[in-house]
Structures are given as structure tokens and as C-alpha cells.
Amino acid sequence: MGIWRRLSRSKLLWPLVTLGILLLFNLFFTPHFFRIEIMEGHLFGNLIDIFKNGAPIMLLAIGLTLVIATHGIDISVGSVVAISAGVVAMLIGGDLAGHPKYPIGFAMTAALVACVAAGMWNGMLVSWIGMQPIIATLILFVAGRGIAMVTTNALVIWLYVKPFALLGQGYLFGLPFSLYIVAFLLLITYLVTRRTALGMFIEAVGINPTATRFAGINARSILFWCYAFSGFCAGVSGLIVCSTVMSADGNNAGNLFELDAILAVVLGGTSLNGGRFFLLGSMVGALIIQTLTTTIYAFNVPPEIAQVVKALVVYAVSLLQSENFRARVAGIFGRREIAA
Amino acid sequence: MSESTPILEMRKINKHFPGVKALSDVNFRLFQGEVHAIMGQNGAGKSTLVKVLTGVYRHDSGEMLLEGKPIKPDSPLAAQKLGISTVYQEINLCPNLSVAENIFAGRQPMKLGRIDWRELNRRAEEALKRLNVSVDVTQVLSSYSIAIQQMVAIVRVLDVSSKILILDEPTSSLDEVEVEQLFKVIRQLRDDGLAILFITHFLDQTYRISDRITILKNGEFVGEYKTGSLPKLDLIAKMLGKELSEFSFAMGGEERKKESGKAGKDGKIVLLVKDLGLRGSIAPFSLNLNEGEVLGLAGLLGSGRTEMARLIFGIDGANQGEIHVKGKRQSINAPRSAMLAGMGFCSEDRKNEGIFSELTVRENIILALQGRKGTFRYIPKKKQLEIADELIKTLAIKTPSANNEAGQLSGGNQQKLMLARWLATNPIILILDEPTRGIDVGAKLEIMELILSLSRQGMGVIFISSEFEEVIRCSNRIAVLKDKAKIAELAGEEMSESNIMHTIAGGR
Amino acid sequence: MRTKLPILVTLGLFLIMFGAGSIAFIGFFSVQNFLNLFIDNAYLLILAVGMTFVIISGGIDLSVGSMLALSTMMSSSLLEKSHMAPVLVIPIVLAMGTVLGLFMGYLIQTFNLPPFIITLAGLYLARGLCYVVSIDTIAITNEFWKAAAHSAIKVIGNNFVSPSAIIAVVVVLVGLYVFRFTKFGRNVYAIGGNEQSAILMGLPVASTKIAIYALSGFCSALAGIVFTFYTLSGYALNGKGMELDAIATVVIGGTLLTGGVGNILGTVLGVLVYGIIQVLIMFQGTLNSWWTRIVIGFLVFVFCLLQRLFESGKKSALGKGLPRQAAKAQAAR
């Protein structure tokens, strides 16, 4: 098969094309968009910003891709990010002299454990009790912010422990450190899902949960761990968010992240109905969103307008994914008989 | 009953779908003051005919006359407006609304611009009383049994308008007492002059309630008969017809019967089922299966064959009885435990319970095997392709490659795909539920050959099919089921179509 | 009766909390304290009424908080920047909310798109539009508005209520009437109970579903106006998370998230429970007010769990064979 045919069949095509269009737009209309300079020993520029700012969403998208592949959804990820930030900040402490209350490693681990527990909670509701995912994760969506605020005593905690800033603000070999974290998690997830049977099982559960069960596979367990993993990813994302601003704001951390993450997954080619999932696609999707935001910033448009644009993109993508819509549009262009 | 003009006449109705002729020149007549039953096996065209009548489908040719005037309803609502009302098995009402509300939804009596609840409830009570049903109409529908819910559904459609009432499998979820109550209501409606079309697969009930029977087979009109003049055996024979004997086996039926004697006596028992049952599903049954034996389950639609299979394979949890595999007692509470015990199961509902249409052929095939090995002992892609290719070859699955999506395969090939999945796990016992349904003759042949060769290799097979002749050709022994219970076993010379039919007709 | 049970639980919950508060804190037990629940939560009550319609029909609307914010922005902007009279401002804002709701309802119904995605995007859209109007807070100085904000209407002796509370109560009464006495209201229940059946029964499902979202938009806009009576300003960050509060109060009030079951009275109780949790925490003094979120989340969980157990209990009561038999008969066709 020729390289072009392989490319056009690849599900990665449309996301990359979309990203390409955005970058092209910037090439023509945004001055200095592609300029990369070396400052303070690391790379610097709009492109680098896109990766750096997109890292939290990319992390969420990794976990969410698997959840959505099971024909589920997790809208609690934003709140879990806040919990993660809150826990790690509380454990590190706001000591002005930069002495951490507990070792950074311990604090980070504790935050991750808390988030995995949150994910397991979601997983239990969906797989054992059998609640609809949107309802099940709605509970943590509501309560999660409360938990985060209680953890931080409703205060914004400022951190001064320098080493912790490495996560979100540091650079390694010139590239943002957070990028390495994303790449690492992406790689591990890819390996686990594609080099073991897990990926296939996840897709099977999303496509036909009954047939999966009949084939002798423990569908419940798979669902459970997908949600637990989503919690873990939200935990890592929260650590990076906290490290980037060296503070934890239980009220605002992770705000509206869930829609960005869901959008990234959908743009990346994974269907909301579950089944085949595309980790790389979700990464491209997150980059599309971040590029969109950065482009809007570059034009000095108030960042909040980005939300309006995002909303419209969601509507457009939803319509395009809707068979009903496509049939109607096709109907305008030619007679279509609707099957009985 | 006088031979007056029928209130409804369907003449030479034809309906085809891509690839299949659902109805060919079918005639049907409905008289007032009569209960008319339509009988036929799977694919006979019963439901298609009814859907044409109720406006879900539009017929390709032929005519429908209601009270002498031609009609062609284009939707269920249009049919309802013409006076053709249907009560489905799923009782299309709203379980959260009260009985009275369900009867009058959309047509509530109003007073001074608002719903007059008192009037609503009063009228509902009256309407139900006419059917000799008295319940508290202010309670929500879901607090009543299916039987009562059905009455409510009937009242609703009759209240809207009705010249014809169609009852689609109304007794599937009713117990004996409730069936008799329903029949009382039906008789009364009939005596009041209503034309009633009754669709059921329960033989005995047809004889109890209907005045006339129309039989369809393979989309064709077999005949219309007065119930009183049609013996049960004739009905069954006409429904099943003589299957086309265009094909022959390498191993004829005669040799099969000789073999069954052998396997039955010397063979090792691989599956022993004792008094396995589930309330509401199937009456407790026992059976055993020998190594290298094919046990056929024969019965009419709704007799409980799938229920039996589902209990054995653990899809439904039995509430009594035991299962022993190769002499060891097994606790089968989920398909996984059945699989680990060495069983495999091909569901009759390929689409919803078997095939992953967006996964590739290869993935569909190795899925169960992979499930058996667990998540971490991943079968390398190369090995997957090997296994898949071999099974594709063995079963002659027609697909451009193992990497095509399973959804692109034809019905017959999808069936083989399901078979391949279980064969890959090397089961001791294989349960096949209607593996030959909905596929072409050539593929049917291949599958039956396959079943025979598997049994020759020592596999124990439970084979379910609606075609008696297929069951006879493939099986060493046959268990006969009727009305959700196992009623007899036939072996050797006993296995013949007429014997099966007699057994079913004769009742318990 | 089984269906009455959830609302009795909520009522019990409220009485217990009110009772506990009265015992634990001096000054808790007063008529004014009770009336304050309506005054302080008038906006939430209105939001929740709209949300009740949506949820009973089996849908969900995640945009109501942002729509409330947009409504506050629009009101304050029209009043202060465009110097429009209140008598014009109010209808315009209400119309805007209704139109946005109509838009979302149209997308959801006509193209069969999932409500939570469309309304979640609506949340973004409305929030973004807030900023389009103004990034900063706009203070309202309009006389009529100030009067509405500060009026105290005397009831029952020396106690008082605000106009907002009265508006909220009126909305509740209208909601009750619509649900009980209009075909539209009954259709909402029917759709939530079994949409397929409702269609087959000939009910106007499509138009009803679109109208429900338009109604929710209207309620969000009205709630926003009422909110400005409270805050006398338009602020883009208003209403963050309010949709969840609204959903939570509806659920706690006994309405099933799966649709078909519930009523306005339950929602009112749900709002009262929400309000009283906040009051209790306030009286307690030391607890972080964010505990409200946690408690509400916990209550939602408990109610959802009960609903789920209730559902699965019902299914097995009807006999295990039933749903499968129906499915089998379908498959056999």
C-alpha cells in the first residue's frame, strides 16, 4: 500500500490536517508565531508555549481516551485536578523559607494516591453499581471541588519550595519538563494498551459489552481500571498545574478542564460511542485546542473569547459526527431514501 | 359464523428488502367478530406482514382494503387513525404515568383550560370495567403486573378508535391465570364484533383462542384455515414444510443414527446437568452430553432452547441445579467460568451478542482465547494472524484479509467467525444456538459438516436449530422442548421429523 | 407509596436539619430564618424549577449557571451602559435566555445529539459571551433595580421577604400548575418515562423536548435577573458551579436522573435542604463553607444509589425472563 493511501486511511489524518490548517493560518497572519529563541538556556517561543500550556490537558486526555473508548465519560477530571493540587500543596506547605513540610516525593505520591482513589470511586459506581457514567462522575464533579477546598481550607496556598517548580516550569535539554512527563505517560499507556491485550479488551467493551462478557472477558474489571487510571492522569495533571503556578487554588484549579479534555479526545478521532481509540490523536486534539487558544491570545483577543470559539467548535464537531446531520446535508444535495 | 365480507383484505402483498424477499404474493383476510391467528416459523414473514398492515413498512405491490376501500398507511399513527390498533409485547406505554393517564395521554379531558383529573379517572375506570377489569386507575402503571398493563394498553388503543385490534405476542410474559383472563377479554371483544389479529408462537393457545389460522412459510402464503378443522399435526407440518433437500451429506442420516447408539453407551460424559432451572426462564431440566456426541435441541419458537443454553453457559444464573464438566462439579455463574471450564457458546443474536463489527476479523477470532489467557499474556500479532488465518482456512471464511472489519462480512461468514472464536479456545463442549439461521444454503451445509467433523474429533456439541431436519441430520440424540420445558429425548431410530412433531403436538 | 418515599426522605432530612440546628444554635429557630431560605436561594429555586422540567424529561442542562451569569451581564450592561429602561431590559434578557435554550434544544432534538455535550458547550458559550459583554464587573445603579433589591415585604408579623423570594414562589406555583394541569406538563413526564412509547402514543415529543430546553433557558435568565436584585451587579464569574447545585437539589428532591419521576415540590425541598446546610455551616462558624459542596455531593450519591437499587429491584420483581423474552421475540423477527 502506497504511503499516501496509508496516510489517508490513518485516523490521524484529519486531526493533523486541522492542526496544520491552524498552524498555516498563524504562519500567514501571526507575526513571529514560529520564532523559537534560546533564552536562559532553554527554548522559548509560541510553539513551546503550546506544548507547555497544553500539558495538563494532554495528560487528562490520555486517561479520558480510555474511558471514552469504553463508551463512558468522566466529567470529574477537573475537580480531581483541584484535589491533586490541593493535597500536594498542603503536604508541601507554604513555608516562605522553602522548607517542605513533608518530602516532595511523599507529597506527590499522596496526591496521586488520593486521585487514584477518586478514580476508583468512579469506577466502582460505573462497573459495580452500574450507574450511567455521566451521573456517576457528576457526583465527584460536585463534591470534588468541595473536597479540594476543604483540603486547602479554602485558601490559596502558595508554594516556595523551589525543587517542586521543576515539574511545571523546569526545562530539560531545552524542552519543558512537563513535556517529558506527558511523553512518558503516553508511552507507558501506549505500551500497556497495545503490547498487552488491554487495548483490545477496552475497545471490545466499548463496542459491545454484552459480547465481551459472552466471550468470557471480565468487562467489569476493565471498566473499573479505566476510571481509576483516569483519576491517576488527573492527579499527574494537577501536580503539573500546581507546580506551574506554584500555588493551589481549590476553586479555580482545573476549571473547565473536562470539556477541553473531552473535546481533545473527540477531535483526535475517538468516538464518544466508544470502540477504537487513538491516543496520539487525542494528543493532537489537545494541541489543536491549545493552538487555538494561543492563536487567539496572539491576536490580543480577550482569552475568554476562546471559550466561545471552543463552544462553536464543539457544536460543529458534534454535528459532523451526527449521522442524522450528515444524512440531512446529503439529502440537500441529492435525494435520499430513508430506510424503513 | 357467516361468510360476510371481510373487514380487512390484503391481496398479493409483496415486500422485499435488499437481498431477501420477505413477502411473496401473500393474502390475508380478517373478519369482524373473529380472532384470527397468523402462524409461522422464523423468517416466515409474520412480523413483516403485520408491519405492512400497521404502516411501519410500505408494501411493494398488492393491495390492502379496509372495509372495501384501498389503504396504504405510511406510519403507525396513520394506521391508528384508520382504525388499526396494535398492542405490542413491550407494551408501549409510559410506566411512570398512572393507568388513567396512559389511557388518555394526549387526549385528556379539559375543563376551563386545564386537565380535568376527576373526569379522566372516571372515564378510565369505566373503560376498564367494560373489560371486567377493576383496578385503582390513579396508581402508576408500573405497579401493576404485565397482564394488567396489557389490558390498559388494549383499552387505550380501543378508546382511540378501532376497527381492528392486533395483539402481538401478548402472552409471552403471562402465567396461566393471566392468560385465561386475557382470553376472556379477547372473547368478549370478539363477541362485541371487533376483528382481532392474534400473533403467537404458542400452539396450544392458538387452538384455545383463535377461530381462523393463516399460515406463512418463507414469506409465502401457505393457506387460511378454520381452527376447528385443522389438526395440530397438520398445522406443524404446514408451518415447517418439507425443507429443500437439495443438499446431501457425506454422512447420511442413516449412518448418523447407527453411530448415536455407540456414542451413547461407551462415550465418556463431558457434560452432566441435573435439575438446572431458573424461575421465569425455563423449567428445571437434566441432560448429559458425551464426548464426541452431538445433542440437538429441537422445539418450536419460544420453547426454551436458548434459555437452556444460556443457563448452561452461565449467562443467566440458575437458581437451582448442578452442572458437572468432565465429572467435576462446576460453579457456573458467568460466561467466564463456563469458558474456563471448557465450554464455548455461539449466540443466536449474532449482531448484539456475538460480533464486534468495528473490530477486525483477526481480533474477533482471537478474543475469547485472549480472554482465557488474560490481559498480560498477549498473543503476539504474528501468532494472532497465524491462528486467524488457519481458522479462516478451515472454516472457509470469505474475507479479503484477516484485517478487514468484521462488520463487512456476510451473515454466514459472521457465523463462521463466531465459531472460529470458540474453536480457537479448543473447547470440550460447544453450544451453538441457531448457527444456520439467516445464512445461505451453501454456508448452512458447511457449518453442519463442521459440526459433524468437530464431534468426530471428540468435541461435545449442543446444537440448536429451528429446522428439524437439520437437527436430525447432525445429532446423535435429540432433546425435545415445548413451552419452556424439556419434554422428551429421542435417540437412534426414534429421530424423525414426524416423531418430533408428534412429541410436541402430544404435549406432556 | 413507593413513589412518595423519596420526597418524604427529603422532607425528613430537612426537618431533622432544621431541628438539629434549632437545638444546637440559639436564634436558629425562627420564622425569619426559614423565610431567609427563600430570600437567599431565590435564584437557585428558579434555576431548579427549570432543571426539574429538563431532568424529568430525561435530559440534562449544564449551561444554566453560565446562562445566569450571562443574564446578569446583559441586564447590568443594558441598564448601565445602554441606559435602557428596566421595562425593556427585562423582556430582552428573558428572550435571550429563551432563544439560547431553544437553540440548544433544537440541536439536541433534531440531530439526536447528547444533551450533556451540547449543554456543556453551551456553558462555555454563555460564559464566553459574558466576557464579550464586559470583562469587568458592572455595578447597577438603576433606581428600580435598587428598589427591588432592598425592598422588604412584611409577612407574618415582623418577618419579611424580598421581591426575589416572591418571584421564586410564583415560578414554583406556575411550575406546579403546568406539571399538574397542562398537557405539556404531562407530556414531559411521558417522554421521561419512555420516549419511544410517547412517540408511538402520538404525543408531540419533538416540540415538547425543544420547548423544555427553551424553558430552562428562560428560567436561567429569570434567575439571573433575580440574582442581580441580590448583588446589584453583573459579574462574569457568577454562577460558577450553579448548574450542579441545581441538579443536586433536583436529585435530592427525589427526581430521578433517568427521567419520568419527580416533582416541583421535591425540588423546593431540595433547595431548602441545600439552603439549610449552608446556614448550619454558617452558624457553626468554624467549618469551611465548602463543606456544603461535599455534603451535597454525598447526598446526591446517596440518592442516586437509592435510585439505582430501586431500579434494579423493580426489574427483578417483574421477573427475570421478561426483558429477555421481549428481546428474543424481537431478535426472532
Image (cartoon, grey):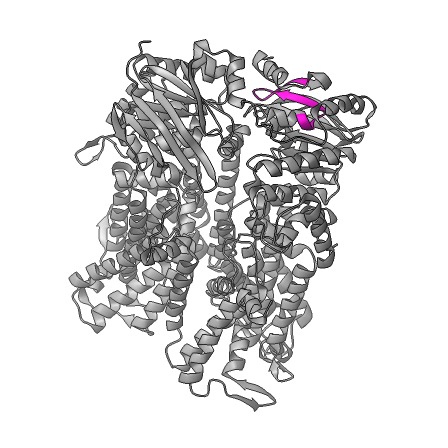
Question: Looking at the image, which residue is at 53% across and 18% down?
Answer: B236
* Place of residue B335 in the rendered image (x, y in percent of width and height, measured from the top left): 66, 39
- Quadrant in the picture for residue B15: top left
Q: Nearer the viewer, residue B170 or B375?
A: B170
Location of the C terminus of chain B (image quadrant): top right
In the picture provided, is C137 more to the left or to the right than A291?
left
Q: Residue at x 56, y 51 (%)?
A: A206
Classify residue A175 by image quadrant: bottom right
Residue at the image point whose x is 37% and y is 56% from the top: A325
Residue located farthest toward the right when viewing the structure as drawn: B266
Horizontal and vertical percent for residue C263? 35, 40
Quarter of the image holding residue A227? bottom right
Residue B319 location (% of width, % of height): 64, 27
Q: Locate residue A8, reporting x and y percent.
A: 53, 67
Does residue B121 appear anywhere in the picture? no
Q: Is residue B33 above or below residue A86?
A: above
> Which of B144/B91 is in front?
B91
Query: What range of the chain is rendered magenta?
Result: B473-489
- Residue B506, compared with residue B255, is above or below; it is above
| Quadrant location of the N terminus of chain B in the rendered image | top left
Q: Residue at x 24, y 58 (%)?
A: C94
Q: Is residue B485 located in the magenta-colored stretch of the structure?
A: yes
Above or below — where is B21 with respect to A101? above
